[in-house]
Amino acid sequence: MSASEPLRTIEETVRATHGRPGPAYWIGLAIAGGVAALGAWSYSLIVRTGLHWTGLQRPGMWGNLITDFVFWVGIAHSGTLISAILFLFRARFRTAVYRVAEMMTVFAVMTAGLYPILHLGRPWFAYWLFPYPNQRQIWVNFRSPLIWDVFAISTYLIVSTVFLLVGVAPDAAALRERATGWRRRLYTLLAFGWRGTDEQWRHYTRAYLFFAAFATPLVVSVHSVVSWDFAVSVLPGWHSTLFPPYFVAGAILSGVAMVITILIPLRRAFRLEALITPRHLDMLARLVVLTGLIVTYSYATEILIALQAPHGDPERSTFLYRMTGPYAPVFWTMVLCNCVGPILLLFPAVRRRTAVLFGICVAINVGMWLERFNIVVTSLSHDRLPFDWRVYVPTWVEWGVTAGAFGWFFTLFLIGLKLLPPVSIAELKEEASHAAHPPGAGEAAHGE
Amino acid sequence: MASDGRVLGTFAEPADAARAVRALRAAAFRVESAMPAPFPEVIAALGKPRSGLGLATFSGALLGLAAGVLLTVGTSVAWPLVTGGKPIVSVPPFVIVIFEVTVLVGSLTNLVAVVVGATLGARRQAAAARAGATGDRIAVIASAGDPADAGRILRESGAEEVRDVA
């Protein structure tokens, strides 16, 4: 078989994903768009008539919307892990799955970035967070974690978008050749004049390495910064040096679980089974196991250290409250989903059953949202002053805005799937070519 | 016989293309290539130096570092407001902002450098760019030598098609 056969097949398979959408796609898009619209309408109630639509009251002034922010920043982490960190480690299995993860990253950051703004009482003043000369003669406070968030999230959005688009350029050039109409114009734009010359590849491969080198510490910094929103305060349950690694591991766990949750239906719906194989899912499931174990260790460390404190210690009191108080169902569901779920994936027989893997990953996503809720809400509900303790319960309006995040994310994702190639054509071509004729074997055959 | 004529050979296999490149270079031809993926054997055979793009990217990162310092330290010193009893120049929190700005400006410089490098590269290799190879074939173009010799080498290396190009 000629090496060009699998190359042509790869391109055709990817091209087919950009064909006319079927009814299932439109139904999915309508549901996602409808849920996003529900979220927008729910939020409009808050904007029009005030924060009384929320369950926020002193001392619990952070609720679902901040939980959503932390959750979606976490989801955004897998893309950079899979595309940049695994690239630097030369993990070849990333080739078939990293484009979906990168798309997910960009759309998840776009979702996450909205929520602190939606949380504001007066969101129209959100631009005050940016440092620019102004008539108010006030300047941003660089010592505040909220400003660190602005810099971290904005940088992460820009860098991950650039990383995605740079990766797409050679693939867009490949798809451009046989495209017509608006799609040809789109691919031409995304190709950045790509012709595949050796000079172009020479610069491109080097630049890609640098993007990966920039993105790797960036991904660690972003969720560390988000964790410092909590850790630099003095609130029991938040003030912990464990938070940055704990948050980064949790983010990667939730992100990889979300990638698997998306890939399983995607490979079936778009007939990508030949490119995204069970081996790829298996390798991702192993990442879930690794990060799940780190998260479990973090939970254990956090709890055991708190329980070693004497009776009456605020840390101990907060952790006992989490485990046995009114939020105990949230805590134990979180433990079940995030600790037991990944451990089940240690067994090859479990992680190789696609339906079971899908179920566990959905459960991990639920568990990770609950983890964020557990951190954000329970600490505020049970601070150092017993007279101030209060249980926060989200209202239906807040649930609507939370659901809206999922609707917004999946709307963007479904549209993105029809505009960008969901797998890297160029890298798969390189892999397929070398699988058919390993470079060493070829050289030997030619006697060189 | 020296000629300005260019000869294009198309290959299905990267190993064949790499062999052709090596043979053409050994015969003192100028060689360009276009390929749908960065096949390492072809790139190695072309024997080109590593891209100097890193220098631009590193400069961009340094510029970002300076911008980050100027933004945090410079503006805090210029407008000294004490907040939370913290020093005017609070190094640990400023490092976070400086790091993010360094990564941002470094990455954007990297983007500009690769776009400029790829555009100039395509201009310098006009024949390869015209031939293009984004599908399933690798194009190898030989020039600055006898076209007949180039055609023979390309055929002997396993080219599927050999033709003269402008």
Image (cartoon, rainbow, N blue to C red):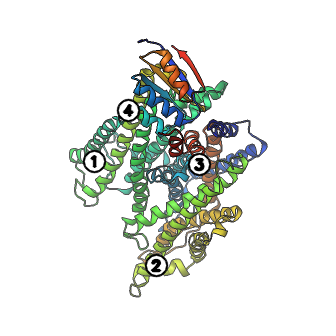
Quadrant containing the N terminus of chain A in the rendered view: top right
Q: Which of marks 3 and 2 is nearer the N terminus?
A: 3
Secondary structure beneath dot 2 equals helix
- Nearest the viewer among B71 and B76 is B71
User: In the displayed structure, would residue A128 be above or below residue A293?
Assistant: above
Q: How far apart are marks 3 and 2 (CA)?
A: 39 Å
- Nearest the viewer among B32 and B110 is B32
Label 4 neighbourhood size at 10 Å, few (<14), some (14-19), many (20+)?
A: few
Report the amino acid beneath label 3: Ala
Report the amino acid beneath label 4: Lys
Residue at the outermost front position: A447
Please identify, in this view, whether the residue under mark 3 or under mark 2 is nearer the observer. 3
Q: How far apart are marks 4 and 3 (CA)?
A: 29 Å
Report the amino acid beneath label 2: Ile
Report the amino acid beneath label 1: Thr
Residue ID at (49%, 68%) = A375
Label 3 neighbourhood size at 10 Å, few (<14), some (14-19), many (20+)?
A: many
- Nearest the viewer among B70 and A165 is A165
Label 2 neighbourhood size at 10 Å, few (<14), some (14-19), many (20+)?
A: some
